[in-house]
Amino acid sequence: MIEQIEFTLRPHARGIHLVTGDVLRKLPPLPEKGLLNLLIKHTSAALALNENADPDVRHDLALIFDRLVPENAPCYLHTDEGPDDMPSHAKSVIVGSTLTLPVTGGRLNLGIWQGIYLCEFRDHGGPRRLVATVIS
């Protein structure tokens, strides 16, 4: 059986945001076993799975991405939408737009320290649309 829904995450400031609870609240009841696939329908934000215990991880990841893909690099051609636009597209490609997660016993089968992150790479990205596909 396959069930699919779309939902919106509220706007977040630029940065790495733990959204596991927000995502779970939007999902239908999960099956005893299966898969959850999440797709973010944007090219300037991403989804990631990472440590959810220490908030310093989120800060450090944002710092790493900003150093890896800086704003205002003179080689960028796509600059019409501001200095954060092209770097946000590149960061989105690096991190990815989908997550596929196992479902066991009606719950996400994540490691004890794992959480779902919205990686917001724009200064003003706005609400973000996600597609959740539950496969059982």
Image (cartoon, rainbow, N blue to C red):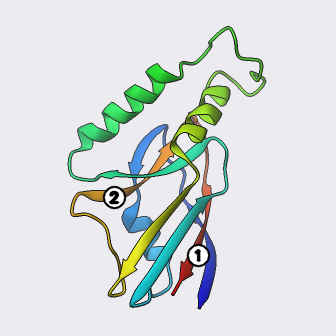
| Relative side of 21 to 91, left or right | left
Instruction: Specify the amino acid type for callout 1.
Output: Thr
Residue 112, x across and y down, in percent: 21, 63
Q: Estimate how packed mark 1 is, as few (under 14), some (14 to 19) or many (20 or more) residues with alpha carbons within 10 Å.
A: some
Image vertical order of residue 73 relative to residue 13, above or below: above
Which image quadrant for residue 74? top right
Instruction: Specify the amino acid type for callout 2.
Output: Gly
The numbered mark at residue 4 is none
Residue 5, x across and y down, in percent: 62, 77
Image vertical order of residue 55 relative to residue 105, above or below: above
The residue where tag 1 is placed is 133
Q: Residue at x 48, y 77 (%)?
A: 35
Image vertical order of residue 28 relative to residue 110, above or below: below
| Relative side of 52 to 48, left or right | left
CA distance separating discs 2 and 1: 18 Å
Residue 16, x across and y down, in percent: 41, 43
SS under mark 2: strand
**Farthest residue, direction top:** 74
Q: Residue at x 66, y 50 (%)?
A: 42
Q: Nearer the viewer, residue 63 or 37?
A: 37
| Dot 2 and dot 1 residues touching (CB under 8 Å) | no
| Relative side of 48 to 96, left or right | left
The residue where tag 2 is placed is 115
Q: Residue at x 60, y 54 (%)?
A: 127
Which image quadrant for residue 83? top right
